[in-house]
Amino acid sequence: MASDPLDGVHLVIFDKDGTLIEFHLMWGGWVEELARRLEASTGLALRDGLYPLLGLDRGSGLVMAHGLMAATPMRRIREVVEEYVAEAGAGPAAAAEAVADAWHAPDPVALAQPVTDLRALLGRLRARVPTFAVATSDDRGPTERTLEALGVAGEFAALSCADDGRPTKPAPDPVLYLCSSLGVPPERTAVVGDAPADLRMGRAAGVRSVIAVLTGVGDRASLEPLADVLLDSIEALAPA
């Protein structure tokens, strides 16, 4: 790879939460509300176990880089939570009912905060790279609503989401699907993400450039060994 991570790149695949939008604002409050609802429904003290189970630091509200919340599809998180509630004393049937009643998705319109002025950044970046896509561990519905609410839905030529039916991060499948759909080979593609799973996905797909950003769950120690370049934010890809 050249010293310029976008040299020779025709497609940039962005992660969503933690890369395009503030991750902790979206998901930290969600875990607290889920815990409140589950405790109210079951009468069990669940918070102390739920936070580490999902990989969230209760004191800071920050999601840990290798925790479940960092890059796990919602359907799997729901399964894990249901198993936890059952084993905590509710039993399988009551746990399934409690989780069904408590489960909710964050409101992307109310909670999604971009890490920078995305329309301006993507406008500058398009002078160098013609095509953008998103690969996310979130489901398609909330992903589309989030991008629409931020006014950038039209900037992305394709999405790969957790409920699309293909293997998810860190498997290479989302990247390979997007490359195939858009007619751009992996060797002309860059992947940008904030979590180790994003970077492993890009590396497994054989992309030209794997770019890490420090605006989400990963820190320098967890990201730098996996990345070709480490940036403070996607803003650094095309500074104003």
Image (cartoon, helix red, strand yellow):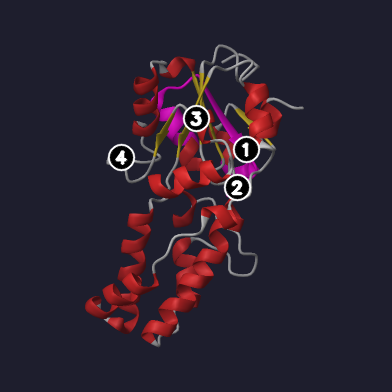
Q: Amino acid at mark 2?
A: Gly
Q: Earlier in the sequence, mark 1 or mark 3?
A: 3
Whole-angstrom CA distance, mark 3 to mark 2, is: 21 Å
Residue lying at the far top of the rendered structure: 8
Q: Which residue is mark 1?
A: 213
Q: Earlier in the sequence, mark 2 or mark 4?
A: 4
Discs 3/4, front:
3
**Nearer to us in this view, 113 or 10:** 113
- The secondary element bearing badge 4 is classed as loop
Q: Which residue is mark 2?
A: 216
- The secondary element bearing badge 2 is classed as loop
The disc at residue 156 is 3
Q: Is residue 7 left or right of residue 97?
A: right
The reply to whether residue 89 is in sight is yes
**Nearer to us in this view, 184 or 198:** 184
Whole-angstrom CA distance, mark 4 to mark 1, is: 23 Å
Q: Earlier in the sequence, mark 4 or mark 1?
A: 4
Q: Which residue is mark 4?
A: 167
- Residue sitting at 52 percent across and 46 percent down? 146
Query: Does the CB distance between marks 1 and 3 fall below 8 Å?
Result: no
- Residue sitting at 68 percent across and 23 percent down? 124
Whole-angstrom CA distance, mark 2 to mark 1, is: 7 Å
Residue lying at the far bottom of the rendered structure: 43
Disc 2: CA contacts within 10 A as few (<14), some (14-19) or many (>=20): many
Whole-angstrom CA distance, mark 3 to mark 4, is: 21 Å
The segment highlighted magenta reads: 199-222
Q: Position of residue 63 (x, y in %)?
A: 56, 57
Q: Quadrant of the C terminus?
A: top right
Q: Position of residue 110 (x, y in %)?
A: 58, 57
Q: Position of residue 232 (x, y in %)?
A: 70, 38
Q: Amino acid at mark 4?
A: Pro
Residue lying at the far right of the rendered structure: 240
